[in-house]
Amino acid sequence: MYKKIHIYLFIILFTMNCKKEKTFFDENGIEFIKFSKNNIFVSKYEISNQTFINFVNDGYKKNIITIDSLNRVLGSYDGDRYYNEGLKILYKINTESDIQFEDSSFYCLNDRNLLPVRKISWFASHLFCSYYEYRLPKENEWLNLSLESSYNDQLFENKVTEVNKIFDLTTDGIVNINSNVSEWIEPFFDNQWPYKQIRGVSYKNIFDPLNKKLGNYAPQLLEDVGFRPIIDIKK
């Protein structure tokens, strides 16, 4: 509780002081860039394995996150119109996973720290954002960002790369909205289906249009889908 209050106060004070600033690093080391069209700060990069590991290690120590006998990383969810309240899968560890677990600690294999975290459920991206008092982008916010992307398919690579390797850039300097990995965003696909929305080109798929509306079940662990958080600018 203290940590959440501390983070919340930090965000309020920092964003009050930075209304006219275009970029800042928060206490978790994430660089946020101001996107004035929607009055939000957006993570410059997709969330990396290392940043996600910091989160799950902290959550594991506080019993917010657990790991079961099947090597499934689990966290709680408050529920919504389709998914019940309770423990949900965030990530599943196997011998090929970027993220591993040993001696009560999560760690990253080899030199994969700066790769975007992938094979995470929508619940994982939501819990990460809730824990740090961020949130996932709304549909119109992500679309507005996508429209400012300088995507060039000649820079396309058919493998995942570090989050700071630039394939496309918005006018504000937000990196890879339409490349590297696709991204979970906040809303459902529509009012009928239980799918959560996914947006953006990935190293596996180029869509036409680039911001094509996609979706999948919230527990799905997809090889080419990650996420990025946003912070509202306090008025």
Image (cartoon, rainbow, N blue to C red):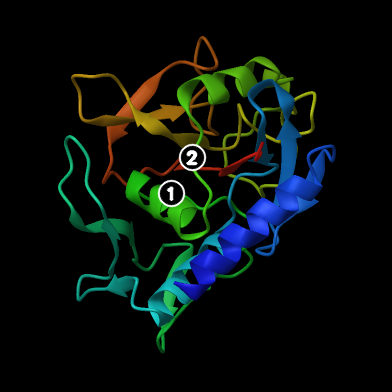
Which residue is label 1 attached to?
A: 125
Left or right side of 31 for 40: left
Q: Is residue 175 above or below residue 3?
A: above
Q: In which quarter of the image is the C terminus?
A: top right
Rendered location of residue 69, percent (x, y): 20, 76
Q: In this view, does 212 lie to the left or right of 161?
A: left
Residue occupying the point 62% across, 30% down = 177
Report the residue at 67% width, 20% height from top.
153
The residue carrying pointer 2 sits among few (fewer than 14), some (14 to 19) or many (20 or more) residues within 10 Å by Cα, namely many
Q: Can see residue 126?
A: yes
Question: In this rendering, is residue 136 above or below 102?
Answer: above
Residue ID for mark 2: 136
Q: Give the residue at x 65% y 15%.
A: 147
**Foreground: 68 or 127?**
127
**Which residue is outermost to the right?**
21
Quarter assignment of residue 97? bottom left
As shown in the figure, which amino acid type bears the numbered disc 2?
Leu
Q: Where is residue 2 in the image (x, y as percent from the top left)?
A: 50, 74
Q: Residue 197 at what x, y percent from top left? A: 37, 28
